[in-house]
Image: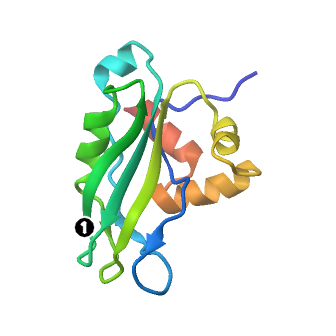
Amino acid sequence: MRKPTFAALLLLCMTPMMTLGVGAAPSAIIKTVPVYPEQALLKNINGVANVKYDIEYDGTVSHVCIVQAKPVGVFDKSVLTAMKSWRFERDQPVKDREFTFIASGRYTATEIAYMVGYSDQAHFTRAFKRWTGNTPSSYRSALKKG
């Protein structure tokens, strides 16, 4: 029996970034989750959006662009709108940071963990909690409540 699936955009950071200065990458203070487009949800459309962006000295995000999206144009507006409100620690600029959003209603957390290169779900769960503040199961439950 399959585990319940996600019905919203899952945030999955897949690619390391280059920092301008020395030291660790800045921690996210605010990461707004993109809204799953209503038409995509109604039609059960799944997809992926790869995004590239910079983090400025003041912690804001700039130069956001969709590098690749499948299907093209379905999730782009939602992803770009959400990223406008992202904030990171100040005084730690980063250029060309990449992030991948997976929009799916059919994959379990374990399947997603393996898709993005985690060796087991526990590592993915810790990373997911760091990014969203919730475990995948509590995030899924909140989505079901609407």
Instruction: Report x, y in % for residue 38.
Output: 30, 22
Residue 4 lies, with reference to residue 125, above or below; the image says above
Q: Residue at x 44, y 40 (%)?
A: 142
Near mark 1 (Cα within 10 A), the count class, few <14, some 14-19 or many ≥20, is some
Report the front residue among 49 and 85.
49
Residue 62 lies, with reference to residue 72, above or below; the image says below
Residue 56 lies, with reference to residue 66, above or below; the image says below
Q: Which residue is mark 1?
A: 60
Q: Residue at x 48, y 66 (%)?
A: 17
Instruction: Report x, y in % for residue 60.
Output: 24, 67
Q: Residue at x 30, y 35 (%)?
A: 76
Q: Residue at x 36, y 20 (%)?
A: 40
Quarter that holds the C terminus: top left
Quarter that holds the N terminus: top right
Residue 88 in the figure: left or right of residue 123:
left
Instruction: Report x, y in % for residue 36.
Output: 35, 31
What secondary structure is marked by label 1?
Answer: loop
Write down the quadrant of residue 127 in the picture: bottom right
Residue 77 in the figure: left or right of residue 46:
left
Residue 60 in the figure: left or right of residue 108:
left
Report the front residue among 131 and 143.
131
Report the front residue among 91 and 96.
96
Q: Amino acid at mark 1?
A: Thr
Residue 99 visible in the shown view:
yes
Residue 13 in the figure: left or right of residue 125:
left
